[in-house]
Image (cartoon, rainbow, N blue to C red):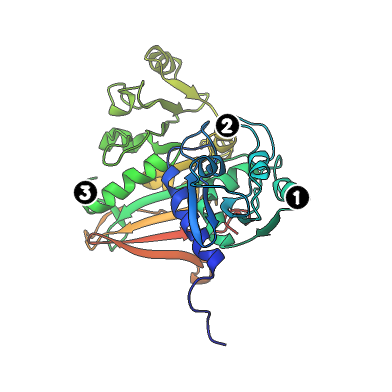
């Protein structure tokens, strides 16, 4: 059977709503990104998107910016309109008052406070409501929100740049720079889009990164350092500019009291999620703690041991692997031992994207280890 060519009218306007929604990227968390388009007699008369957390929702912005009477129009919205009081009043009330003929929804809101109730309310008031237009794209847009709202723990992105032979650094530890300038800008955009960023103490000691957003416009993520025994140098860059980007250390309860007092004197918070039976920090426990703090997304940047742990424990929801056209031979592996002894056991990722950034190739791989994420 031949594949369908072109977009339907509903898909075309929903695609525009998706484009608008992405303008809120990095600014609306823990809320979802949402876009809305109002169409009447074949003409777009209003557009809006959720611009910042606590601000007006996409539907309200589109209604307030509409040119002319909205009655009889069709409203396209990427996510089911809310029907509860949160930081803002229910969107469905404003939509009903505007008297559109139809509402087209991309995907149902998984929030238990909504979850079909907004759609049902619109239909109860005689408004034709269509659901599921570009549904997969609308769900993928808010993968962070869907994961967090359904599991209470953050969406985890593991990102690293490697050479063709799988190294993130040379044998001497040199890693600047594996990837190209466009890939570095992409890395900063990822930082902006995530609520928190995590690295190991070794990465801080060896590379002394700032872990802030500098190459693109946007907010800084919460900086997390896995530091079992609190060995991170107090003069490290991650402890600077705490008013712009907070740093939290993740340590074991057995960390020396003197080091704990030193860090606390500098105003650095220390979390102790517990340890596993083999003495490693409990990463699952850490994710639960972050979820309780409304951290909806976590970007893991390294180093090798940390990357390996998140993959081995199946905690990553997405892998982003930047591959540079370089070979260094002996060096530091991007991913260490996963306990795989046969090629039939190799991890495979059926949901994947491949694109170019400068001279690099980038893989975006959905793991599927949590079936509720982007499924």
Q: Position of residue 250 (x, y in %)?
A: 47, 29
Point out the tag, 3 or 2, that comes first from the N-terminus: 3
Residue depicted at 48% across the width and 42% down the height: 65
Give the distance between the C-alpha atoms of the residues marked 3 and 2, in whole angstroms: 33 Å
Numbered tag placed on residue 120 in the rendering: 1
Residue under the image location 26 percent in, 37 percent down: 207
Q: CA distance from mark 1 to mark 3?
A: 53 Å
Residue that label 3 marks? 177
Separation (CA) of disc 2 from disc 1: 35 Å
What residue occupies the far right of the structure in this picture?
A: 124
Q: Provide the residue designation for mark 2.
A: 289
**How many numbered dots are placed on residues in this image?**
3
Mark 1 and mark 3 in contact? Answer it, CB < 8 Å.
Answer: no
Q: Which quadrant: the C terminus?
A: bottom right
Q: For mark 3, give the secondary structure.
A: loop
Residue 340 visible in the snapshot: no
* Position of residue 167 measured from the top left corner of the image (x, y, whole percent): 29, 55
Residue 365 location (% of width, % of height): 46, 60
Task: Give the image quarter of residue 96.
Answer: top right
Give the structural element (helix, strand or loop) at label 2: helix
């Amino acid at each position: 059977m031949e594949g369908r060519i072109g977009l339907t009218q509903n898909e075309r306007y929903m695609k525009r709503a998706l484009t608008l929604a992405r303008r809120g990227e990095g600014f609306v968390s823990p809320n979802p990104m949402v876009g809305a388009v109002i169409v009447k007699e074949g003409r777009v008369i209003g557009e809006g998107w959720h611009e910042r957390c606590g601000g007006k929702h996409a539907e309200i912005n589109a209604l307030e910016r509409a040119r002319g009477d909205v009655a009889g129009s069709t409203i396209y919205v990427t996510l089911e309109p809310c029907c509860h009081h949160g930081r803002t009043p229910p969107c469905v009330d404003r939509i009903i008052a505007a008297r559109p003929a139809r509402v087209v929804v991309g995907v149902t809101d998984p929030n238990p406070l909504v979850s079909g109730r907004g759609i049902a309310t619109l239909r109860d008031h005689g408004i034709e409501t269509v659901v599921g237009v570009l549904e997969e794209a609308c769900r993928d847009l808010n993968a962070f929100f869907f994961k967090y709202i359904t599991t209470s723990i953050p969406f985890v992105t593991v990102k690293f740049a490697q050479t063709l032979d799988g190294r993130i650094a040379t044998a001497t530890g040199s890693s600047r720079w594996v990837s190209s300038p466009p890939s570095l800008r992409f890395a900063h955009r990822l930082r902006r889009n995530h609520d928190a960023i995590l690295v190991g103490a070794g990465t801080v000691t060896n590379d002394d990164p700032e872990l802030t957003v500098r190459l693109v416009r946007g907010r800084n993520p919460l900086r997390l350092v896995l530091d079992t025994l609190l060995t991170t140098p107090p003069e490290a860059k991650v402890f600077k500019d705490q008013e712009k980007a907070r740093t939290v250390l993740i340590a074991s309860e057995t960390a020396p009291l003197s080091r704990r007092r030193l860090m606390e004197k500098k105003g650095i918070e220390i979390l102790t999620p517990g340890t596993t039976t083999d003495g490693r920090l409990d990463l699952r426990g850490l994710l639960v703690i972050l979820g309780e703090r409304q951290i909806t997304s976590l970007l893991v940047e390294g180093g090798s041991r940390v990357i390996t742990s998140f993959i081995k424990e199946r905690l990553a929801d997405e892998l982003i692997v930047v591959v540079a056209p370089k070979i260094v031979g002996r060096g530091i592996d991007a991913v260490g031992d996963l306990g795989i002894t046969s090629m039939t056991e190799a991890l495979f990722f059926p949901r994947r994207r491949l694109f170019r950034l400068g001279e690099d190739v980038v893989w975006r791989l959905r793991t599927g280890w949590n079936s509720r994420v982007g499924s």
